[in-house]
Image (tube, rainbow, N blue to C red):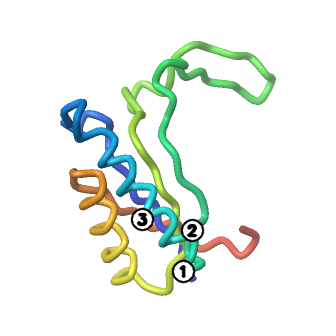
């Protein structure tokens, strides 16, 4: 089984205040479906109110992030699935629930994880 990252930036969700609860309910329904199917690994949204920091090997903390990263926010889901086709199907379900396109990335295989 392969792990997949399904994600979107917060700016992709252009919702009215009235739609927010419906989208939240539908997204939670997809999460429940993924858990029931046994493919759920992790998911959540980045807390954009807390700024990122870099921590080096010596423990030094620097405010900010890597320059090439620029901005990392939005929602993330990690699922463990039998195929890329299955990952595309789950990404489409999340896209419907969240009302925005989802980016799909595959994690490299690591026998220790």
Q: Quadrant of the C terminus?
A: bottom right
What distance separates the C-alpha of mark 2 from that of mark 3?
10 Å
What distance separates the C-alpha of mark 1 from that of mark 3?
10 Å
Q: Which class describes the residues within 10 Å of circle 1: few (<14), some (14-19), or many (20+)?
A: few
- 75 shown above or below 33: above
**Where residue 50 sits: x, y (%)?**
54, 19
Left or right for 107, reference 24: right
SS class of the residue under badge 1? Answer: helix
**Cβ–Cβ below 8 Å for labels 1 and 2?**
yes
**Where residue 14 sits: x, y (%)?**
19, 36
Q: Residue at x 68, y 25 (%)?
A: 55
Mark 2 — residue? 40
**Where residue 35 sits: x, y (%)?**
57, 70
Q: Disc 2 or disc 3, which is closer to the eye?
A: 3
Q: Quadrant of residue 18?
A: top left
**Where residue 105 sits: x, y (%)?**
40, 62
Mark 1 — residue? 37
SS class of the residue under badge 3? Answer: helix
The label on residue 95 is none
Mark 3 — residue? 30
Q: Quadrant of the N terminus?
A: bottom right
């Amino acid at each position: 089984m392969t792990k997949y990252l399904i994600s979107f930036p917060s700016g992709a969700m252009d919702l009215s205040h009235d739609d927010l609860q419906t989208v939240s309910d539908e997204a939670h329904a997809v999460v429940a479906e993924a858990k029931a199917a046994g493919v759920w690994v992790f998911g959540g949204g980045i807390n954009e109110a807390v700024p990122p920091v870099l921590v080096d090997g010596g423990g030094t903390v620097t405010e900010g992030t890597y320059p090439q990263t620029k901005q990392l926010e939005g929602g993330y889901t990690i699922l463990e699935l039998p195929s890329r086709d299955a990952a595309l199907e789950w990404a489409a379900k999340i896209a419907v629930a969240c009302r925005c396109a989802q980016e799909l990335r595959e994690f490299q295989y690591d026998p220790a994880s």
